[in-house]
Image (spheres, rainbow, N blue to C red):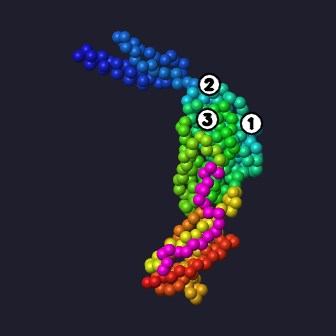
Amino acid sequence: MRSIFKVFFLSLVVFLFSSLPLLSGQPDFNFNLEGKTIPRLNLIASPIIDDFLVNDDIGIHSQMSPAIGLDGSNNFVITWEDDRNGQYSDIYAQRYNYSGIPQGSNFIVNDDTANNYQSYPSITIDAPGNFVITWNDDRDGDPDIYAQRYNSSGDTVGSNYLVPNYQYAFFSQGSPAVAANSSYIYYTWVDNRRGNYDIYAKVVDWNWTEVEEDQDANLPNSFELYQNYPNPFNPATTIPFSLKVQGSTFKGPIPTTLKIYNIMGQLVKIVVDEEKAPGNYNIIWDGKDNSGKEVASGIYFYQLKTRDYPETKKMVLLR
């Protein structure tokens, strides 16, 4: 009976003191009951570090979209969008130790010198203090995701680099986020490479700093239209073709059409009419015309056209 009463009394004391208003200036409470200490209740509710200004510019410029990362020793880095250099915003950051003392001054993260928008930064820090900042970047004419690595001393590792595979960089990417552990960096973003907005991601190790390391070695270096298969066919056939990468700095889509004609030269079906990234494609024609009707047996021609490359091949449909 006595033990039940003791449990009830302890619970009542904790409840009563945890219900007290948090009054600044009041002492913390510690309780000792029959040699047992009740957990300390902090009623001060004062900040560890009071409000402090992060950006060190003295102008009347706008700073927006802050993000913060914390390492294993409670040192932290704050990054944000900053228009102190004119109407086009840049990405800035500031390092602090665990006491909130600035380590150096504000520094710019993006390394392009043109008037382009950089915005919406995200940051991650591993336990030793190495960190990565990623952001939206318009330096290539459309929104892409760029990133920059730093070591635990705040020194840059490599230069700014494109996060998505470069052959998709002419599509819109946005809303980047990043996380990391001691082995890997995890990126994710919004991407419209498929025509609608999807969520894409990439996982790399800490040594990955150049976009060239992620290029697909199998990307074609020529435009090619290949023989369809099967041929003859019924009811459908696959038409393979390749769109080449135009140099190491290719940043634009390739207007591409693939059309089917009958033996009289009349247009039967537009199979492809859109801008496509460099790559290898396998397009299926279902043996139907533009109205959705099945076409008759016979000889047909399929023609691939890009800006500088027209090619036509023959195929046979046998119903």
- Characterize the local packing of mark 2: few (<14), some (14-19) or many (20 or more) Cα atoms within 10 angstroms: few
Q: Amino acid at mark 2?
A: Ser
Residue contact at pointers 1 and 3, CB within 8 angstroms? no
Which segment is the magenta one?
Answer: 212-232
Q: Residue at x 61, y 74 (%)?
A: 304
- In the displayed structure image, the side of residue 104 where residue 74 appears, left or right: left
Q: Is residue 294 above or below residue 159?
A: below
Q: Which residue is mark 3?
A: 130
Q: Earlier in the sequence, mark 2 or mark 3?
A: 2
Q: CA distance from mark 2 to mark 1?
A: 22 Å
Q: Residue at x 49, y 22 (%)?
A: 43
Q: Amino acid at mark 1?
A: Asp
Q: Which residue is mark 1?
A: 57
At numbered mark 2, what does the secondary structure look like: helix, strand or loop?
A: loop
Q: Nearer the viewer, residue 202 or 124?
A: 202
At numbered mark 3, what does the secondary structure look like: helix, strand or loop?
A: loop
At numbered mark 1, what does the secondary structure look like: helix, strand or loop?
A: loop
Dominant secondary structure of the magenta stretch? loop
Closer to the camera: disc 2 or disc 3? Answer: 3
> What x and y, as percent, mark residue 65?
63, 43
Q: Which residue is mark 2?
A: 99
Q: CA distance from mark 2 to mark 3?
A: 18 Å
Closer to the camera: disc 1 or disc 3? Answer: 3
- In the displayed structure image, the side of residue 307 where residue 300 appears, left or right: left
- Characterize the local packing of mark 3: few (<14), some (14-19) or many (20 or more) Cα atoms within 10 angstroms: many
Q: Quadrant of the C terminus?
A: bottom left
Q: Quadrant of residue 92?
A: top right
